[in-house]
Image (cartoon, rainbow, N blue to C red):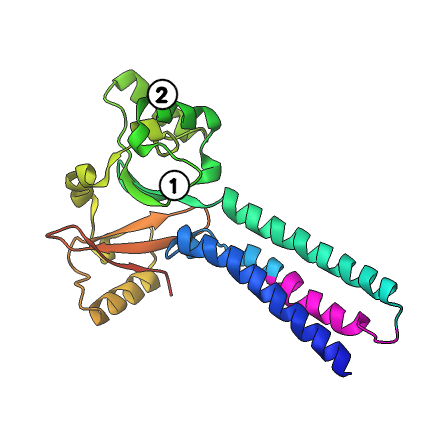
Amino acid sequence: MRFRLTAFGLHLAGSAFALGLILGGLYLGWYRWPGWYLLGALRVLGIVLLVDIVIGPTLTLIVANPLKVRRVLARDLAIIVAVQIIALVYGATTLWLGRPLYYTFSVDRLEIVQASDLEREEIERARRENPDFAPHWYSLPRWVWAPLPEDREEASKIVNSAIFGGSDVIDMPRYFRAWSAGLPQLREKLSAVADISQLNKLEKQSFAKRMTALGLAPEEHNAILLWSDVRRVLVVFDRTTLEIRAMLKPS
């Protein structure tokens, strides 16, 4: 039994180290709050944890019989490790392709933009026309303003495209500008929690209570929702400086 427990412990430690190194790097680099929550990354993480931390070491505990021929034991362990590596590569690749690159303010809303949202053609065009805001493999998430172009015809095309499920201006980093440049427009779109139509009555009450506990005024026009395809959080700003004071998820 000691042999089995030793093999289990070593396998568990090795799996945890590899998982922590890769996923920890992704979390610290790209998925810090609110990215991890907004994109529902725990669903991917759950699959990886199940295979790499639970199933893999448990199977090692089962097959690690000291009476087995070493060649057979090595084969069994190699199969288990191979399955774990596949799960880890799947999880890491999924998170990498879906990593958040921008938190955008455009027109009247805040939205998160993932790497998978950007087409290669748009990326190349941004690198030519707006290199300061073009994404690269090493780019970390940043807050940007994504205004519609001044050309009315071009702006109309983008709006129509977004209405019918096509690309929106937040998918076109060639139009991105500094976050600070969009703050005057952002200020006009902030609302009191009670006035945010996308929240139901219970959510409004919950957010107001939590804001009050944090010393924030829910009756001020200081809040706006930050959206993803999966979830949303309430972003609360300082009305004077427009610095972010809190990002609250629905209770």
Q: Residues within 10 Å of mark 1 (few under 14, many from 20)?
A: some
As drawn, the residue found furthest toward the left would be: 240
Residue 183: horizontal and vertical position, in percent?
17, 42
Residue 216, image quadrant = bottom left
Residue type of the residue flagged with mark 1: Ser
Quick one: 200 or 47, which is closer to the camera? Answer: 47
Q: In the rendered structure, are the residues bearing label 2 and label 1 in contact, judged by CB atoms less than 8 Å apart?
A: no
Would you name the residue on which mark 1 appears? 139
Left or right of 92? Residue 8 is: right
Q: What's the magenta region?
A: 49-67
Residue 196 pos. (x, y %): 27, 52
Q: Nearer the viewer, mark 2 or mark 1?
A: 1
Q: Which mark is residue 157?
A: 2
Inspect the image, locate mark 2, and give the three-letter code of the amino acid beneath it: Lys
Identify the main secondary structure in magenta. Answer: helix
Mark 2 closeness class: few <14, some 14–19, many ≥20 residues within 10 Å: few
